[in-house]
Image (spheres, rainbow, N blue to C red):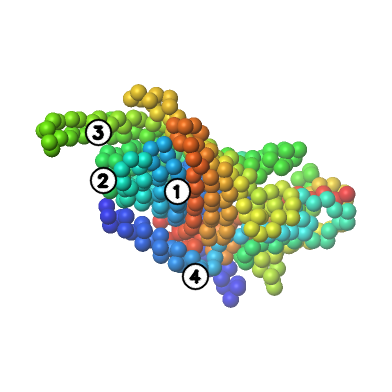
Amino acid sequence: MSAFRSILLLAALILVGTSQAWPHGFAGKRFFPATLAVDDPFISDELSLEMNHIREPDQVSNEFSVAYSKRITPDFGFEFSEAYQHLEPNQGGSKNGFDNLDVGMKYQFFLSAVHETILSVGFDAELGGTGSGNVADSFSTLSPGFFFGKGFGDLPESMKFLRPFAITGMIGPNIPTRSSNVTTTIDPVTGDISQDSERNPTTLSWGLTFQYNLQYLQSYVEDVGLKAPFNRMIPIVELPLTTCLNLGCNGQTTGTVNPGIIWFGKYVQLGAEAQIPINQRTGNHVGVLLQLHFFIDDLFPQSIGRPIFR
Amino acid sequence: MWMLRIAIITFSLLSAVATPLCAWAHAFPDHSNPSVGSVITVSPAHVRIWFDGALEPIFSTLQVRNTSGQRVDQGDGHVDESDKTLLEGSLPPLSPGTYHVFWSVVARDGHRTEGDYTFTLH
């Protein structure tokens, strides 16, 4: 039976090509995890559930999000994400509802196994008007982006304990389809008409992650005796940042520094990060970001977890 | 658009429920002998690497090379018949030096993983 299964697997791999049997987020022996705050540089079949709680200057924000990505080819795929928000403004009552639907695509155009490098480009569209009116924007935002990941497994022997280190990052503008929203209000008593104008500036999202993969250390550099669950942990620091580019807020940057831990198993990944505001414009309180992530390509390797076209 | 939103959430819940039903995934090394990065004083007769899942014997390979890049193992790297998580190969008596172990394995789901590590014989 074992030989029969091997023959079947051989036939399958010849048909689909063994070079295309790499699982999610790998560049050679480097595993890049799906990061919580800064979009990662690879496309894969995956499903991510996240919870985000942070006190911003003008409100407390609680967000529960779902993101699903699907490979069409081994290097190209689509991404969909949706979030339910519970907002508690400093003034006024709380607001609940779905945010706008995000639809995106990503193309991984370079992969070096030897140098543990992944490069990709993507395009994301937040579809205005698809969310609840009280929490979501009425306009769309278009976000092309460039993504990279680099592991340092190619460092010399004298620096071997830096080999488990990796960085990933992204940069891309967020272009609103409407530069301002004008709200007209009629006073029911006096009949006076007033208009409020809210600007929607173009912003630049950019971010970096710094990762130290303990599984890489244990399996490829030196067995330091780590046992489960520590031998599958990745201490990580993420820096998701946004810089305003126009409409009077040029150069103003907001963002957080997110130290945390990612643990990855065979089928799922768990992540937890603190969100420390980088300045008062971002906030004064530490937030929390939690992740439950499913590797669909490992859960369903012969069906929905594989690319549609090889 | 609501249909797509409901589809995403439904798929999320189904995936979460289905997780315990599945038993395949790529293989990572669990431990090895000689261990990764170790310094030993007796020439080992074998290199053995235990993985966290069963391997497909036909696609799983193991090589050991010296610092000059010459292959020094006996060329019999294979998955153990009785323990499908074990990849092993035989070694002749080695002279002192640093040796590089290269492995490549395919798990039951067809996902390939590969890696390498060194050990030093004093």
Q: Disc 1, disc 2: CB below 8 Å?
A: no
* SS at badge 1: strand
The residue indicated by pointer 1 is A52
* SS at badge 2: loop
The residue indicated by pointer 4 is B21
* SS at badge 4: helix
The residue indicated by pointer 2 is A133
* Crowding near the residue tagged with mark 2, few <14, some 14–19, many ≥20 C-alpha atoms within 10 Å: some
The residue indicated by pointer 3 is A181
Residue at point 52% right, 39% down?
A276
Q: Do labels 1 and 4 share a chain?
A: no
Q: How far apart are marks 1 and 2 (CA)?
A: 21 Å
Foreground mark, 2 or 4?
Answer: 2
**Relative side of B28 to A306, left or right:** right
Instruction: Pick whichever of labels 3 and 2 is earlier in the sequence.
Output: 2
Indicate the amino acid at tag 4. Answer: Leu
